Amino acid sequence: MRTAHTPVLTVLLAACLTSHGCAQPGNDAPDPTDVPAFQIREGFAVDLVVDGLRGARFMQLGDDGTLYISRPRQEDIIAFAPNDNGTYSSLGTFVDGRKLVHGMHFADGWLYFASDGLIERARDTDSDGAADEVETVLANLPDGGGHWWRPVLVTDSFIYTSIGDGSNTSDQTDTDRQKIWRFDRDGTGRTLFASGVRNTEKLRLRPGTEEVWGFDHGSDNFGRNVGDRPGNQPITDLNPPDELNHYRQGHFYGHPFVTGLRVPRYEFLDREDIHELAANTTPPEWSMGAHWACNGWTFIDPAINGATGALPADFAGDIVVAAHGSWNSSVRVGYCVARVLFDDDPINAGKPVGMMPLVRCLDASGEVLGRPVDVIHHPDGSLLFSVDAPGGRVYRLRYVGD
């Protein structure tokens, strides 16, 4: 796969990519019942399926059932094999030495993954858990700090990716950041797809459509310019929302000038074009709580849900999202796995209409029991969600009936 920036494909031996043969994290199959005192919605149960994986972030499932988990701080992706009891055991390091590796998407037998400044794809052709073929798909992409979490979405025709704001609310409209970019599958055809994005960590298509969706993080310290301070921040505590956006080609989503339902930010009220910027902003399809930090998420695939019956029928087409939780709020908010309900009536089909938490990862006193990062819909119909702290774990959320 060749791009204008990459003269040749990079194909590397597994020996250069992995620490295979060394002690691997998350190696032992965990006790499924070793679950903290999460607050779980009635009718659901949670099992532990991966344990001891420090820094666990995003997840993908391969066609053969292999579970891949990215760890940006450790610069690797770990592969896991399923056990008969529904837990997973480590196969070892799939790839390593990948700075800030995070977003992933499995397509056509390859695991596509994004790291600092590039997107690669890899596969394990001898089933030992280590990638023995790795190819550069896109190179010379925007890199750097700030909100560096890069999503990758692979469709039949395109690859989508993004990189967020370099800080909190900087004006980077003249750079490649704060934008979603689209490429042809061969790496050519670079196209600006959408702009005004602060930090969207995962992009996915709504099932049965070509619609691109994602959650965008709201900013910190929204009320600082009008007097909010730690311990007395009534404006910041409730603003701005995390946004669930339907990303459309050529649309502008407001950041850094406008947030939520076309609300101008205080820092930019003196701009002569602030009213025009607000008018040109595509508002979110749904607003989540401020400071929830909605990271990874999944649509409930109607085909899987119909075939397995693992979740109630009305879950089909809904979203389940992992909210990592707040730091810039007077009280802890987020820290949950939540369902966003979509209307299936033809008059409003494909639109979010509500939200409900499924798992709260705080105990009754508000102490943190887990910081959810990602959610995926398993082919058996259940949901897997990862937490990167405390420790690093993956849980299975399953419906057990009323």
Image (cartoon, helix red, strand yellow):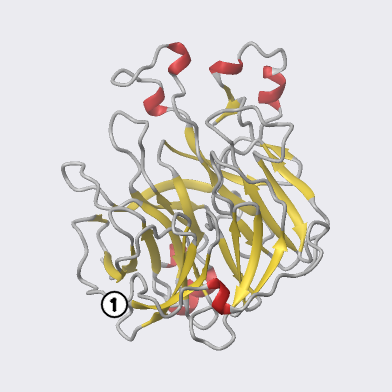
Residue at 64 percent of width and 48 percent of height = 162
Residue 72, given in percent of the width and then of the height, sits at: 48, 56
Looking at the image, residue 310 sits to the left or right of residue 349; the answer is left
Q: Judging from the image, what secondary structure is the residue with disc 1 in? A: loop
Q: Quadrant of the C terminus?
A: bottom left
**According to the image, label 1 marks what residue?**
28
Q: Quadrant of the N terminus?
A: bottom right
Q: Residue furthest bottom?
A: 126
Residue 89, relative to residue 391: is it above or below? below
Depth order, front residue of 163/44:
163
- Specify whether residue 206 is in view: no
Q: Amino acid at mark 1?
A: Asp
Residue 28, relative to residue 208: is it above or below? below
Residue 92, given in percent of the width and then of the height, sits at: 43, 76
Residue at 46 percent of width and 23 percent of height = 222
Depth order, front residue of 203/358:
203
Residue 7, given in percent of the width and then of the height, sits at: 82, 64
Residue at 57 percent of width and 81 percent of height = 124
Residue at 65 percent of width and 65 percent of height = 120
Depth order, front residue of 38/179:
179
**Residue 155 sits in which quadrant?**
bottom right
| Label 1 crowd (10 A; few <14 / some 14-19 / many >=20) | some
Depth order, front residue of 398/327:
327
